[in-house]
Image (tube, rainbow, N blue to C red):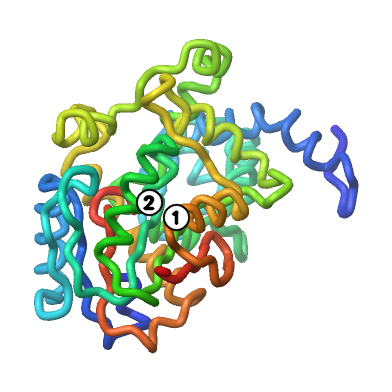
């Protein structure tokens, strides 16, 4: 397997070529509920293999791929969920959201040839909340931890000290 | 709430559809932020956006809508802001040469793309600045994922 090289002008193409396989690692982790089965305490690869129902060699490969994705951290022979995973996987949100593109990765051609109307256009056309299972109170709540992070980041990029009142338009749904 | 962790002096109004505001009210109450953050229910297409704020934020909103829809939204924001007020438009921008991370086209295909009159667009920094200028905002800077402009 060719390894991505620093300053290799073709690196982005290799990443794309291998990306589908990388996405399969993520898909497998979701299918196995790998994060959920890890629990909160650090575990060895041996223990992970038991919990994930994989041979130890395979568990090692999956764990390494999740470390590359910054979902897991490997330290002193133990695996733990990364800070990213702990913060953004609240309520299963992160992996739930990853599941959608993984499921749709094989329908790209159809999506581009025959795009469907997006659900949120009900707001514009009917003045109503979208009739879409992903845009509901549970979705808004699950998004909250990520929005907090986004807000902190935004306040780090723009100095609000000269302002007194902010209006966040559409900020309760997705923004 | 995330912004207020670094700008605690800021009063905030969240303007959104009723279903989203209902959840926001719960989260604001759980965080004990009712004195600083309030919600206003509305639809940025049909109703006047509340005035009084000196900075407005459109975060991950405009990419969901057609250019014509964006113009309607920006006209309402323009009406709500005082002259010189700041509009921050946060998006996952392409660079002006349309380079970006390899995930961007997938986001385009699955999240933003849609039927002709019911699809969004993922802008570059320059495209957003041009749109803002056409709708009465003077671009004043870029930051990561952010275009800063002043209401003319």
Picture layout, residue B76 above or below residue A50: below
Taking A38 as reference, is B9 left or right?
left
Which residue: 60% across, 54% down? Answer: B125
Identify the element where label 1 is drawn. helix
Depth order, front residue of B110/B85: B85
Q: Which residue is mark 1?
A: A85
User: Is the residue under label 2 in contact with that under label 1 (CB below 8 Å)?
Assistant: yes
Q: CA distance from mark 1 to mark 2?
A: 5 Å
Task: Name the quarter where the C terminus of chain B is drawn.
Answer: bottom left
**Host chain of mark 2:** A
Q: Where is residue B86 drawn, in percent x and y? A: 40, 72
Is B83 in front, or is A49? Answer: B83
Image coordinates of residue B109 in percent, x first then y, are 53, 27
Q: Residues within 10 Å of mark 2 (few under 14, many from 20)?
A: many
Of all chains, the one bearing label 1 is A
Residue lying at 46% horizontally and 38% vertically, measured from the top left: A50
Q: Position of residue A167 (x, y in %)?
A: 26, 67
| Label 1 crowd (10 A; few <14 / some 14-19 / many >=20) | some
Instruction: Tell me if B126 is positioned left or right of A115 in this view.
Output: right
Q: Quadrant of the N terminus of chain B?
A: bottom left
Using the rendered image of the protein, determine whether residue A81 is visible from the camera's viewpoint: no
What residue appears at the point 65 percent right and 27 percent down from the top-left corner?
A20
Instruction: Tell which of B101 and B17 is nearer to you.
Output: B17
Q: Quadrant of residue A120?
A: top left
User: Residue B84: in sight, yes or no?
Assistant: yes
What residue did someone put label 2 on?
A89
| Vertical side of B1 occupied by B109: above or below | above
């Amino acid at each position: 397997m060719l390894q991505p090289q620093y300053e290799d002008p073709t690196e982005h193409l290799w990443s794309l070529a291998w990306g589908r396989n990388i996405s399969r690692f993520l898909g497998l982790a979701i299918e196995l509920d790998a994060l959920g089965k890890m629990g909160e305490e650090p575990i060895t690869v041996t223990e992970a293999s038991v919990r994930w129902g994989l041979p130890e060699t395979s568990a090692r490969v999956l764990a390494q791929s999740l470390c590359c994705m910054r979902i897991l951290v490997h330290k002193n022979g133990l695996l733990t969920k990364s800070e990213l995973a702990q913060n953004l996987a609240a309520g299963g949100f992160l992996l739930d959201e990853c599941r959608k593109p993984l499921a749709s990765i094989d329908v790209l051609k159809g999506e581009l040839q025959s795009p469907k109307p997006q659900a949120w256009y009900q707001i514009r056309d009917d003045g109503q909340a979208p009739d879409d299972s992903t845009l509901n109170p549970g979705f808004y709540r699950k998004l909250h931890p990520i929005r907090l992070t986004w807000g902190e980041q935004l306040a780090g990029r723009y100095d609000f000290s000269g302002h007194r009142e902010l209006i966040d338009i559409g900020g309760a749904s997705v923004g | 709430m995330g912004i207020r962790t670094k700008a605690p002096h800021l009063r905030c109004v969240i303007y959104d559809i009723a279903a989203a505001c209902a959840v926001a009210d719960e989260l604001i109450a759980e965080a004990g932020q009712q004195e600083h953050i309030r919600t206003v229910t509305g639809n940025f297409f049909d109703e006047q956006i509340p005035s009084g704020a000196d900075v407005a934020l459109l975060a991950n909103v405009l990419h969901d809508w057609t250019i014509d829809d964006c113009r309607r939204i920006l006209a309402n924001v323009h009406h709500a802001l005082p002259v010189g007020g700041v509009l921050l438009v946060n998006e996952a921008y392409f660079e002006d040469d349309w380079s970006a991370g390899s995930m961007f086209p997938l986001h385009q295909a699955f999240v933003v793309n849609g039927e002709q009159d019911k699809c969004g667009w993922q802008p570059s920094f320059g495209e957003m600045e041009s749109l803002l200028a056409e709708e009465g905002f003077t671009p004043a800077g870029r930051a990561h994922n952010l275009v800063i402009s002043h209401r003319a």
